[in-house]
């Protein structure tokens, strides 16, 4: 977690919560100038502007939803939303669903930007895809559609969106002080492009109508604006909706229209299509009857007219294309589409125009898309035994079309897809169940059908799991035993033209289990790219078992992930404990022995292990009573006795030996695997005939890792992500590791990329992470320390500068780290609280910096809410940065201008970052009863180009959590580093911990004081 502060000098335009500004008066248009700017004033309208900047992720979504609810609760007539998020289809999108729900339950109209992802088709964003939204595209001052304006049709159902357009190119708007959005015109105004600039025009137009007609609902306001929009012949309904907003035409209409002839996507039918109808309602608001002429202009995408009878209008008041409307009355017209008169794979758009006797016109779009001819593609699946798979998941997608379908099959051997004529690919994963127990997986295999062509008939394809081969990795030159740990399979497929990329991934832990991982060989992809990414980590076995008498033999075993680990070898007598029940142990002397327990399911053995521990057993060996691959079983954390699982056949052999007399076993264990090999691979073009891989031990680099713990060993987790060449993402589960241990990790050198995270315990989300890194040269050794004390500010910085200020912002980012300068804590960091002082007076965060030279003091308190096993150090850190700073006058920081908003000047503040180098053991302990030597340094922040010299340093230590302090001896080592000697008392004279207070200062008066509570432990 990064505890950061970003200061912006001056006022801001938004309140930051998605609520916006509720105003009683608003300026809106009563007419449009030729340059696209509106003129006129409409006081008294109720307008709510709810623009959210930089919205991303669930946090921003929750704020947007809260803002929408708040707006409706305030009784707003109009809500303007200039935001958007990518979507694949309507339905399941929380923002658009909220817009529709709030529109149904209130009279509020939501005016929403279409998005700036044009000029491609189907580029609309959420929540603009909502049915009830008045979705706004952008045009320039000549009513030409802006290239960036997002277009329809809406993904999934091919509905007409956007609904309307407005000027959104070169719009001059108020500029919030200190910001640089768009192209600043002067101190007060900026010019910008976007549908976000067009949307307020329409919101203002809606406010004008709401003022003129206070009894109108949001739905009626939307109908009036859209029906009276100015349609351009150069653009289709999918580009402009009804057309450009026209306030005068909509302000006091005598003729109104609601409804549209939008038929969306018509699915392929093998037989006769049913006719489709839509209803249009015309209202005559005048005092006299009127006659309306109805004309229809609809053409296919290629410009052809529809066949006669394909689209017809009818209604009780219609005759020869004329509709009679009574004064103050309304009439309905039915629009009928006969799909049987339209060829498949046809898209048609146009407008129905109604012209009243007085010349007033209203329009509504017409649009429909006939799906292309479809045929059935049946896929039969066989597992590794030729039977029905336990589970299959796959995606079918078009290589020359936009078809996309994801399916999951549970114990189902066949499925049928209806696919349009075209080319397709299917990627997936097939799981084979254990015979007789399909809930347990025997194998997971990747498969691919890369070259599917649908032409004029149905077809059946087969995925044959009996052809799958196992992913194995042989490390030539490694003679020590290895067990498989983490695995990953990933498939990517694209069309080769930049149209799309599909990916499907899976990952899990084996940790000694015998489940198979592999792939079914495929043909080579004849278009685009097909890649299979695989990963396998192999490690020193956590536990090993052998029979030592009456004969010698090795018994394959696996240890459950959360079982208690031990170090060394236990030589034990084996006893048959039956099913592990209380009755079984009541008649058995298990004290100090290894208890063999026979169970149906090794995943449910907690009770049996507890019974064994209560009976005094020194270890438990679990054997399943059913056939199947060796499993590592499942146990809860905190059990009192080591547990290993063996296979069915091995269990029977052990029982057979016990039937003939006394049996002794040797159970060996390690607290942590001393060595691990990590190997990512990519197979390009096809899934290979064999998944067997061979590498040489000399092809690796060595990472000498120490996994530090706070005073006592605990079980943590290690997440090693790895990317083979061209791999777009890494999916991995975390491996269980012992914190307070050391190990060698061998990572395959070359173009592969890695990134590791370490969780301090299984009960905490506290995580240290490193950036992505590669090792181009093999046979090199790198040393890494994870969670090495003391807790401190990380030297890692992803930006261009830190503790820096420009003419538009000030950047202060404090990320928690450990003893490795590349590590940072992205989750589980202590809570940060800040206070800010200028010239000795505390000031509010938003008003900290001033242009003139001033003395500053930034104060931060980091506090961890609670300790966890293995996480007991550095729970409180108090830091005070003191320095002098004035407004920057030059661009002194390289690449600083790449930040947004873009600065013109940028300089670092002369703040000092304390750093430490303590030679602690794996439990973050230093020796007691003698002098301990370490170093402290005064470092500068990223971007600094001035002197690094420090004038002095002072270090104090406390052995009673800061109640009393003792000065340590400091001696200069170089211009910014100091050697510290602390004379630790005997352990009994302390509370077992050392707190540190460090002061570092330079000759210019900058000083940082940092206190770390329980910085490290004593032994």
Image (cartoon, grey):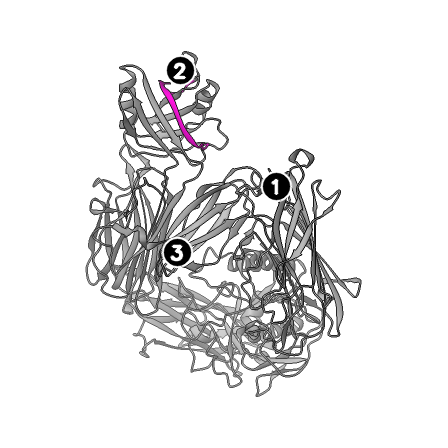
Closer to the N terminus: mark 3 or mark 1? 3
In the image, is residue 316 part of the stretch drawn in magenta?
no
Choose mark 2 or mark 1, whichever is in front: 1
* Residue ID for mark 1: 1017
Query: What are the residue bounds of the magenta stretch?
Result: 564-581
Residue 243, position in %: x, y?
A: 49, 77
Q: Residues within 10 Å of mark 2 (few under 14, many from 20)?
A: some
Residue at the far top in the pictured view: 587
Report how far apart the C-alphas of labels 2 and 1 lie in the structure.
Answer: 46 Å
Q: Name the secondary structure under disc 2.
A: helix
Task: Choose mark 3 or mark 2, whichever is in front.
Answer: 3
Which quadrant of the rendered structure holds the N terminus? Answer: bottom right
Image: 732 above or below 318: above
Q: Mark 3 points at which residue?
A: 780
At 28% across and 56% down in the image, what residue appears?
426
Using the numbered discs, state the Cα–Cα distance from disc 3 to disc 2 in whole angstroms: 55 Å
* Location of residue 624 with respect to 105 vertically, above or below: above
Q: Can residue 252 be seen in this view?
A: no
Residue 619 at x, y percent in the picture: 41, 25
Q: In this view, does 233 lie above or below 983?
A: below
Q: Which of the labelled discs sits on residue 483, or is there none?
A: none
Q: Which of 207 and 156 is in front in this view?
A: 156
Q: Quadrant of residue 119?
A: bottom left
Q: Which mark is residue 584?
A: 2
Q: Judge from the rendering whether residue 868 lies leftward or rightward of residue 292; answer left or right.
A: right
N-terminal label among 2 and 1 = 2
The answer to which image quadrant residue 48 occupies is bottom right
């Amino acid at each position: 977690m990064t505890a950061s502060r970003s200061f912006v000098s001056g006022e801001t335009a938004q309140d930051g919560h998605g609520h916006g500004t509720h105003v009683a008066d608003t300026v809106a248009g009563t007419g449009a100038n030729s340059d696209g700017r509106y003129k006129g004033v409409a006081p008294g309208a109720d307008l709510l502007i709810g623009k959210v900047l930089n919205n991303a992720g669930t946090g921003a979504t929750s704020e947007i939803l809260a803002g929408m609810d708040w707006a409706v609760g305030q009784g707003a007539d109009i809500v303007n939303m200039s935001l958007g998020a990518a979507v694949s289809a309507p339905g399941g999108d929380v923002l658009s669903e909220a817009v529709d729900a709030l529109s149904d339950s209130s009279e509020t109209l939501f005016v929403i930007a279409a998005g700036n992802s044009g000029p491609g088709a189907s580029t609309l964003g959420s929540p603009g895809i909502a049915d009830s939204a008045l979705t706004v595209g952008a045009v320039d001052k000549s009513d030409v559609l802006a290239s960036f304006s997002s277009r329809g049709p809406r993904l999934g159902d091919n509905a007409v969106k956007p609904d309307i357009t407005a000027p959104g190119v070169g719009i001059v708007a108020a500029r919030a002080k200190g910001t640089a959005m768009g192209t600043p015109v002067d101190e007060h105004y900026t010019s910008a492009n976007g549908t976000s600039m067009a949307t307020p025009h329409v919101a203002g137009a809606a406010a004008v109508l709401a003022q003129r007609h206070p009894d109108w609902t949001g739905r009626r306001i939307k109908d009036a604006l859209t029906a009276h929009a100015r349609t351009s012949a150069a653009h289709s309904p999918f580009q402009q909706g009804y057309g450009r907003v026209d306030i005068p035409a909509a302000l006091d209409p005598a003729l109104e229209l609601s409804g549209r002839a939008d038929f969306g996507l018509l699915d392929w039918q093998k037989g006769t299509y049913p006719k489709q109808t839509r209803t249009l309602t015309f209202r005559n608001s005048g005092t006299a009857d009127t006659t309306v002429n109805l004309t229809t202009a609809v053409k296919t995408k290629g410009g052809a007219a529809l066949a006669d009878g394909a689209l017809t209008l009818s209604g009780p008041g219609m005759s020869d294309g004329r509709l009679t409307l009574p004064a103050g009355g309304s009439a309905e017209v039915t629009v009928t589409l006969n799909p049987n008169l339209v060829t498949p794979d046809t898209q048609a758009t146009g407008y129905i125009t109604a012209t009243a006797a007085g010349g007033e016109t209203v329009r509504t779009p017409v649009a429909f898309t006939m799906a292309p001819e479809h045929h059935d593609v049946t896929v039969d699946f066989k597992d590794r035994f030729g039977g029905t798979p336990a589970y299959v998941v796959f995606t079918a997608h078009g290589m020359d079309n936009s078809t996309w379908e994801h399916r999951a099959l549970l114990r189902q051997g066949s499925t049928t897809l209806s696919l349009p004529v075209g080319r397709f690919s299917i990627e997936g994963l097939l799981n084979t169940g254990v015979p007789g127990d399909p809930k347990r997986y025997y194998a997971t295999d990747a498969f691919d059908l890369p070259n599917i062509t649908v032409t004029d008939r149905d077809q059946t394809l087969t995925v044959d799991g009996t052809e799958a081969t196992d992913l194995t990795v042989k490390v030539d030159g490694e003679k020590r035993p290895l067990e498989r740990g983490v695995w990953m399979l990933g498939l990517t497929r694209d069309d080769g033209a930049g149209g799309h990329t599909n990916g499907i991934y899976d990952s899990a832990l084996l940790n000694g289990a015998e489940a198979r991982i592999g792939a079914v060989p495929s043909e080579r992809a004849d278009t685009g790219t097909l890649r299979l990414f695989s990963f396998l980590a192999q490690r020193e076995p956590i536990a090993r078992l052998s029979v030592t008498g009456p004969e010698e033999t090795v018994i394959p075993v696996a240890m459950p992930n959360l079982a208690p680990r031990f170090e060394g070898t236990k030589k034990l007598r084996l006893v048959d404990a039956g099913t592990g029940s209380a009755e079984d142990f009541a008649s058995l002397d298990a004290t100090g022995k290894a208890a063999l327990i026979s169970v149906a399911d090794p995943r449910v053995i907690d009770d049996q292990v507890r019974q064994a521990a209560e009976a005094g057993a020194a270890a438990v060996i679990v054997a399943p009573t059913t056939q199947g691959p060796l499993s590592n079983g499942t146990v809860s954390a905190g059990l009192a006795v080591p547990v290993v699982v063996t296979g069915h056949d091995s269990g029977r052999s052990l029982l057979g030996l016990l039937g003939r007399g006394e049996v002794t076993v040797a159970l060996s264990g390690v607290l942590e695997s001393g060595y691990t090999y990590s190997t990512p691979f990519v197979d390009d073009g096809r899934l290979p005939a064999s998944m067997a891989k061979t590498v040489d031990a000399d092809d690796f680099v060595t990472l000498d890792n120490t996994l530090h713990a706070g005073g006592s060993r605990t079980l943590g987790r290690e997440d090693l992500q790895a990317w083979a060449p061209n791999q777009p993402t890494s999916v991995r589960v975390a491996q269980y590791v012992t914190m307070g241990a050391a190990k060698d990790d061998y990572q395959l050198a070359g173009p592969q990329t890695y990134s590791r995270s370490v969780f301090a315990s299984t009960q905490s989300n506290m995580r240290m992470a490193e950036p992505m890194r590669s090792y181009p040269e093999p046979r090199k050794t790198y040393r890494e320390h994870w969670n090495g004390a003391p807790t401190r500010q990380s030297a890692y910085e992803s930006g261009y500068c830190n503790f820096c200020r420009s003419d538009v912002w000030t950047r202060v980012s404090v990320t928690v780290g450990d003893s490795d300068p590349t590590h940072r804590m992205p989750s589980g960091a202590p809570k940060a609280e800040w206070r800010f002082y200028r010239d000795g007076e505390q000031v509010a965060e938003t008003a900290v910096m001033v242009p003139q030279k001033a003395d500053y003091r930034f104060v931060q308190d980091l506090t961890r809410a609670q300790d966890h096993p293995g996480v007991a150090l550095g729970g409180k850190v108090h830091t005070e940065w003191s320095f002098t700073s004035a407004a920057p006058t030059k661009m002194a920081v390289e690449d600083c201008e790449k930040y947004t908003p873009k600065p013109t000047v940028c300089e670092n503040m002369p703040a000092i970052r304390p750093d430490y180098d303590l030679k602690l053991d794996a439990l973050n302990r230093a020796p007691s009863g003698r002098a301990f030597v370490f170093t402290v340094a005064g470092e500068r922040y990223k971007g600094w180009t001035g002197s690094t010299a420090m004038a002095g340093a002072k270090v104090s230590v406390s052995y009673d959590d800061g109640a009393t302090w003792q000065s340590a001896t400091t001696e200069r080592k170089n211009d910014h580093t100091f050697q510290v000697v602390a004379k630790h008392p005997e352990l009994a004279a302390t509370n077992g911990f050392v707190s540190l207070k460090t002061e570092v200062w330079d000759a210019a008066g900058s000083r940082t004081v940092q206190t770390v509570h329980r910085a490290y432990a004593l032994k």
